[in-house]
Structure formats: structure tokens, C-alpha cells
Amino acid sequence: MKKFLKITGITLLVLLALAFLIPIIFKKQITELVKKEINKSLTAKVDFTDVSISLFRHFPKVSIGLNDLTVVGTGVFSKDTLISAKSLDVSANLISVIKAKDIKVSGIYIESPRIHALVTKEGQANWDIAKASGDTSSSTDTSASEFKLTLKKYRISNGYIYYNDESGSMSAEIAGLNHEGSGDFTADVFTLATQTEADAVSFTYGGVPYLSAVRTMIDADLGIDNSKQTYTFNTEDIALNNLKLTAAGSFGISNDSTYQMDIRFKTPSNDFKDILSMIPAIYKNDFDKIKTTGKAALEGFVKGTYSPQQLPAYDVKLNVEKASFQYPDLPKQVKNINLALQASNSDGAPDNTVINLSSGHLEMDNEPFDFRFLFRNPVTTQYIDAVAKGKLDLAQVTQFIKLENGTRLGGLVAADIFAKGNMQALQTQSGNFAAGGFLQIQHLLYSSPSFPQPIQNGNMRIQIANQGGVADNTNVDIAAGHIEIGKDPIDFTLKLSQPMSVVNFDGTAKGSFTLDNVKQFVSFEPGTDLTGQLQADVRFAGTKAAIDKGAYDQIKTSGTASLRQVKYTAKDYPGGISIPLVQAGFTPANASISQFNGSYLGSSFSGSGSIDNLVGYALKDEPLKGVLNVAVDKMNLNDWMGTSGTEAAAGSTTTTSTSSGPFLVPANLNLQLNASAGQVTYDKVNYNNIKGTLVLNDETVKLQNISAAALDGTIIFNGTYSTKQSKADPDIALSYEVKDVDIQKTFFAFNTVQKLMPIGQFLAGKLNSQLSMTGHLNGDMMPDFSSLSGKGNLLLLEGALRKFAPIEKLANTLQIDELKSITLRDIKNSIEFANGKVLVKPFTVKVKDIEMQIGGMHGLDQSIDYVIAMKVPRKYLGEQGNNLINGLATQAANKGINVKLSDVVDLNVKMGGSISNPSIKTDLKEVAGDAVADLKQQAQDFAQQKIDSAKQTVRDTLTAVKNQVVNELKDELKDKLLGQKDTAKSNSLNETKKEAEKKLKNTFEGLLKKPKKAAADSVKQ
């Protein structure tokens, strides 16, 4: 027995030791495997602080965890975090992990995730981060994944999800989410058991909040049939706040856009208190103490096909009878609540939709409020029958509803409004439509701890009238409105007419607004502050039809507006932006800014200008046009352009970047900026007396004649910076001209010069240069040197070359001291660069009586491949040099080449290796041949590489254009199927085709054009 216990104890001890040691022994191997899989699968930037491995968390499975995980998008989402989580754990088979092959993942566990799911107006989703299966780029690992999903369980703990779909006007927010599911995901047919709890669920569609901070609990078993793509459920465990629901049904996927559904739901209880819990203001204030009477029932179904061309049938009913509620510690009750609401569609045809609130009644402080609403045939006749009548003393609301402590509410609200008849806009003859009544608000007052500056003295009367029995003859009039926010008064008027067709509007607004009060209406990020004063006196008139058509010249605006003592601080602007004054005037044509000034990070700026299309920009996100004249005293761009990233963590994958991403040029700007600056500092260079023009248009910044004094000379810039084609890797097309600049200062100021002209490190003197180039920037706003191509010329006015290793090695080889320090004057050469190589066309240098014709190539990696044709008087050769020449002549004679050495020796020198570690090969011209011919061949090879690169660009362009046109054809086909003719999309498709043709034509022309004659300093035939 003792022996058995001893063996058992030793065995347990060994197993325990292995449980501790295995994660330590295999951690490095597993970490590298995780990084490899992430980089193989995702385009996003993924970061984590550590990989934790344990046999205890999910014993007997091994747990692989990523701690402090973040996933950041790319392109337009480069500043948006898709996912952050305290930890992401997967449980896997131990043996498969040790083998690092076919790792079987059976569980996924996420702790405290924050998920931000975003969809742009164009329909682009930030979770689309998986690498395409057809990606065959050299950087993409196309091997099969080592992880195999054999999922049995998953869990999300303490999660937060935010979803915002701008294209569908839909948003949702889930806080405090705990969800788990279990089932055999390897089977085609299985049951997925799920449990879900969330502290607060909100959902908004089309600007209407359908759920607001609803506490949610759902336990449901889902029947999964992957072979038929059908999913069924039947549960009695759904709770929304106090509202209990039972639901059963099925959901099937016919194809990517067509779904079959048959879902029914109802409330098992008829307690009115359950329905009352769905009102947020009531539920969050002592709801458990509320006493209620009355009955309520909610039931409905959705059945049929959902597709882009069809909706399912549905019917939802809510009934409340003889209900009331009262807080026990408040004196009054809300009573006699009756409601009958039905929303239905018998067959899914949009025109058969009916919304019928047949009766509504409640009494507050014995004041009755009655209402009803019927709307049917929304596509054709648009029939309405609506009535609202009652009055309410807001000061009495606190007698029967609990509000947040410290809330003040007051004022009188009275309404008597009706509308009945067909509303279709095309009806022009007298009919049976009638509408009229009023809504009046007097002495409105509201404030709360979160809204400390009160809305007060609110007074307005909305009068509704209709003559002639046609809905489009309805007039809505606010003759004199007044409201105060804090101590700021605002007076306004508004008249609306022809609401069913063009919608005429005519209004005025006059008053002031303290910008600090914006935070009462809008949530700012922590650390954000806005102060200042807005004053305005404006009039506006026009039609909604003109806005929809983009006829903004038909929108009449006039008046003035000013901003004073504005200061804005935020996380990205910790020093704050100060704007003491902006004065603007409005006319029907534009907004004229007569004066503005301000300061930021020690820079003071001022200016004036005009803005066009302000209405289109504000209402339809169309391009804002205008001209601004701006003057700045000084700017330190090192402070302005600081990034928000931090150093990569130890566990970071290779996809992590510390950059905040490139500057994205807005798509909705068409601005011309005429700028001047006394001094601009960037990196370590001061640029003085800067003048020029910047044009922002079509997601592109165009630089026009930007001139500056810098580097002891002058610089002129022209070019473009564009994020239209790629948000992650902006396109650049730049040209510059420099005159009389100091070579050393220029070399150390620009990394582009360091790559293109590495010899500049060893040159001292003055330089003139012209250069043009195209290419891309990386996400960190630095050049992608492999993408750069261009050409230029350099004129060395005067200078000295010292300690340049290739020339020093040549000087030592030939023992010519005169080459160790060369004085140069009026040396001109031309360069071309592409595909990471720089071609230096032949140029002539003369050092005393030594003539050298130099040309060749060097790489951006500092590799060199140069040829020098030299004429060297023997008097400059030392003993070692003469011995070398004599030896070369002897070698030639042995080969049968008779070389007669004269006082001047013709040498061919080939330089290879790198700038810091060059190799030298010398030979006599009679043996080596014509060095110029070698340079000619080198230039031809360089040109062929450019042609090959251009051909690849054509192939890539063809593929991109094909995909773009196919996608737009899909959208156009969809519109036709729906019976919609979207002119904008049709025009966009045509423009896409034209733009594609233009791009391809330009590319082919570049390939097929005959080369121009060589310049004077290029390779001679």
C-alpha cells in the first residue's frame, strides 16, 4: 500500500510539474505560431502584450491566451479600434499544440471585449479584415492554417458592443454583455444552447429609438441545420426589463440576399407593469415600488420571404385596458390608460402596410389626453386619420412621475390637432383632405444635474391650416418663437407650405449661444472642452425640392454671424486652439468671412475668404467650395504632426504600427487656400517667407508654387498628395526646384535626398537641382522608396568631395593623392529612378589633368554599380599605381593584346559592392573595351525594367477596374429589379468606365511612345 501511494504521489507530482513546465517550454514556439496565423489571416493591425499558456484554465485542454488584445483597422478605419479585450483565450488539444500542427480549437473565451462595428455611408465595413483567399502577393502566406476549428463552446464575459451602420441609418449598443453557447459545431445538425444577459440594449433605426437601455435576458436552444441552412428556436425565457416574452419559429437562408422566416411571439402575462417597464424614464427610477392596475398584451408574427424585392407579412398588436400607475411616495397617479395599436401587412406588399392606433387615452392630474392615428397605403393614396387633443401642466409632472433628483420642469403644453384624408402629392383638385389645429408651448422650463444651464422662457405656437381639401395646401406657421438656453436668448420664426410636394420654407433666427453649453446636447470625449460665444442674425428661404436636386442657388440666405473668444481643447489638441474672432456675412450666393484670427501651438494665424455651397455641405455632405486667404507668423510642424501611437508591446505582431495613420484628405472639400507664413519649422529645418497655394479637391491636395527660403537657398514645390485611390498608402506626385542650397544641410534634412544622392554626405558646397517623382507614402507618412520613380538634374555650383569610400579606394589603388580630396565646380548630371534603383547618366569630372567620365547605378539599399572611363597622366601615379599599370599591360601582352603605354593612360574602372564597402576593378581600355558602351547597356536594362513595371501596373489596373465596374453593375441591376432609376449611380458607373478607359489609355501610351532623343549629358552612341 505504501508503495502504491508512493508511486501515485510521484506520478501526481510529475504530472503537476509537467503542467507547469509545458507552457514554459513551448511558449516561444506557440507565440511565433500565433503571430504567423494572425499575419497570415488578417489585414488589420493586431497588438497584444503577452501570450499566456496554461493547463489549468480549461483542463484537460491547454489554454492559449492573448492578453490586452487590440485590433485596429486600416485605410479609412486606421484610427478606429475594431476590438479591444482584456484577454482572448482558446482551448485546444494538448498533443496537437505540442506538435504545432492541426491544432484543434474546441473553445473560445473573450474577457471584457469592446467591439466597435462600423459601416460607412458607402457600405464599407470595418470588420472586413480577412485577407482575400486569392491574395498571392509576396508578403502573403498562402499555406493552410495550423488551427482547426472543432468548436464545442464559446463565451463572452463583460462585453460591450457598439454598431453603427451609416448606410442603413441603424445603430445599436449593448453594455454589460455576458453570453455563452455550447454545441457540436463540427456537425451539420446540432443544438446550440445559449444564455445571454445584457445590462443595457439600445437600438435606433431611421433616427427612431426602438429600445433604450433595456436590460435583457435570453435563454434559448437553437436548432442548427447547416446542410439546409435552417435555424429553429422555441423559448419561454426572454426578458426585456420586466417584459417577459415567449417566441418560436424558424429562419432559413435561401441565398445571399433571400431569407425565409416564420416567427411568432407574445407576452405570457397580461400585467400592465411589464409593458410600463419599457419606458426608460420610469424603469430607472424606483420601478419596483410602482403600483399598477390594468391589463396589457403584446403579440405578433413575421412570416414569409425577405429579399431586396419582397417583405414578409407581419402583424403586431399592443393592447392596454383600464390601466394606471402610481409611485407610493408621490401624491397623484396616471390613470385611465387605454391603448389599441396594430401594425400589419397581410402579404408583404409595401402598399398594404397599415399602422392603426385606433384609440389612445390617458389622464394626468385629471387632465385627459386623447389621440388616435391611422395610416395606410403608404405608396399610393397615403391615407391618414390622426387626432391629438389635450393639455398638460409640466410643473405637475413631478406629482406623478419620478424624475432625476435636481430636475426642474415647468410650462404649459396644449394641443388640438387633426388631419384626415389622402395625402398623395399628385392630387391637385379639391378633395376630402382636412387638417388644422395648433400646438402651443408656454413658459417652458427644464434643467437637471446633467443639464445645468436651463432651457427657459420657451414660448411658441404652431398653427396648422388647410384650405381646398388638398393635403399639399396645408400651411404650418410659427409666427414668433422664443427660447433661452442659460442666459442666451434665441428668437425664431418659420413658415412651411406645400409639405407634400416641394416643401416651401421661410424662416429667421436671431440670438446668441454660449458654446460651453454644447456639452449639454452632445457627448464629448474626456478631456474635450469648448468655450466661446456664437451670435447670429440670419434669414433663410427656399424649398426642400431644390435641396434634393442640388439647386442651392435657389436657397436664399442673408444675415451675419460671428464667433468670439473660442477655445477648443481635446486629446489630440492638448494645447488648445484659440480663435478670438470670426466674422461672416451671408448672401444667397455664399458666406463671406471678412475676418478671422486665432492661435494654435504658438502659431498665430489670420485671414479672410468666402465659402460657397454651404447649404449642400451642411445638408447633403456635398463638397464645400471656397477660397481662403491665410497668413501665419510661425509654425512648428514637429508639434503639429505628432502621432498618437505608442511603442509596440513585446508581444506585438509584425502588423502593429505606432503611427496614427496617414492624413486623409476629405472627399467633400473643394477649397483653395492661399497661404503665407513667416517661418515654418519641420524636423530640423527652418523654412522662411513661405508663399503658395493649396487646393483641396477630390480627396487630393494640390501644391501650387510653394516657395520658401531654406538651407541657405530657395525652394519651390509643386505636386499632389491624394488619398482617393488608397487611404492606407497615399499617392504623391511632386516636383521641386532648389537654388543655391547647402549640400550638407540638404542631405541631412531630407531622407529622400539621402536615398537618391548618398554621395551628398561627403560633399560640401552649393547645389542647384530640379526633380520630379511619383510614388506612395506608407501609413507613417514616410515615402515607400520602392514605389518612387522619377527623374531630375543636379548642378554642383562648387564644392569639395572628401572621405567618399569608393573614390578613396580608387585613389589608394592607383596611389593618386589628388583624388582623396576633390574640388568640384559646375558639375551637372541627370538621374532617373524606379524600382529601388537610381540611374546616374554619364557626366564628366576633371581633377587637374585627370579626366573622368562617370555613370552607373546605385540602389536605395546603398549598393553601387558604377563605371568610370579615366584618362590619367602617369605623372600622378605613385609607385604602386605605375606597377599596377605595368602589370595590366603585361597581362594584356600575355593575351596577345599589344598595349603601348603613353604618358596618359586610358583606364576603365568598375565599382561594385556598397558605398561603405566598395569593390574596385581596373583594366586598360584596350583590354576592357568601351566603358561608355557598358553605360549604354546599363541604361537600356534600366528602361526595360521600367517598361516591365508599367506592364504590371496595366494588369493591376485592369483587374481593379473590372472589379469596380462589376460591383457597380450589380448595384445598377439591383436598382432595376427594385424599379428604381438612380441617375446618380448610373452616371457614376459611366464615369467609372470613362475614368478606367482614360487610365488604361494613358498607361498604354506611356508604353508605346517613342523615346525622345538623348539629352546632351546622357549616354552617347
Image: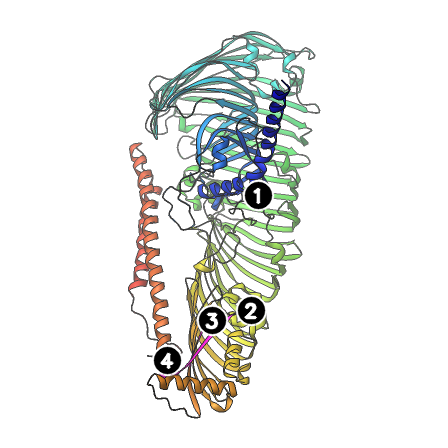
Mark toward the viewer: 1 or 3: 1
Q: Residue at 65% x, 57% y: name it.
A: 604
Quarter of the image that includes the N terminus: top right
Q: How far apart are marks 4 and 2 (CA)?
A: 35 Å
Q: Which of marks 1 and 2 is nearer the N terminus?
A: 1
Please give the label number shown on residue 928: 4
What is the three-letter code of the residue carrying label 1? Answer: Gly
**Mark count:** 4
Check disc 3 and report the residue beneath it: 770
**Image spot of residue 668 (x, y percent):** 47, 47
User: Mark 1 and mark 4: span between their CA atoms?
Assistant: 55 Å
Label located before the other in sequence (1 or 4): 1
> Which is nearer the eye, 851 or 694?
851
Query: CA–CA distance between discs 3 and 4?
Result: 35 Å
Query: To which residue does mark 1 refer?
Result: 651
Closer-to-camera residue (219/697): 219
Mark closer to the chain start, 4 or 2 = 2
Magenta residue span: 908-931
Q: Is residue 914 above or below residue 264?
A: below
State the separation of the CA atoms marked 1 and 2.
36 Å
Q: In front of the other: label 4 or label 2?
A: 4
Q: In this view, does 181 lie to the left or right of 897?
A: right
Q: Mark 3 or mark 4: which is in front?
A: 4
**Mark 1 / mark 3, whichever is N-terminal:** 1
Element on which disc 1 rests: loop
Residue with the mark numbered 2: 747
Please state the horizontal and vertical placement of residue 53, each as a whole percent of the image: 57, 35
Q: Pointer 4: residues within 10 angstroms few (<14), some, or many (20+)?
A: few
Q: Which amino acid does label 2 sit on?
A: Phe
Q: Nearer the viewer, residue 672 or 282?
A: 282
Mark earlier in primary sequence (3, 4): 3
Quadrant in the rendering for residue 284: top right
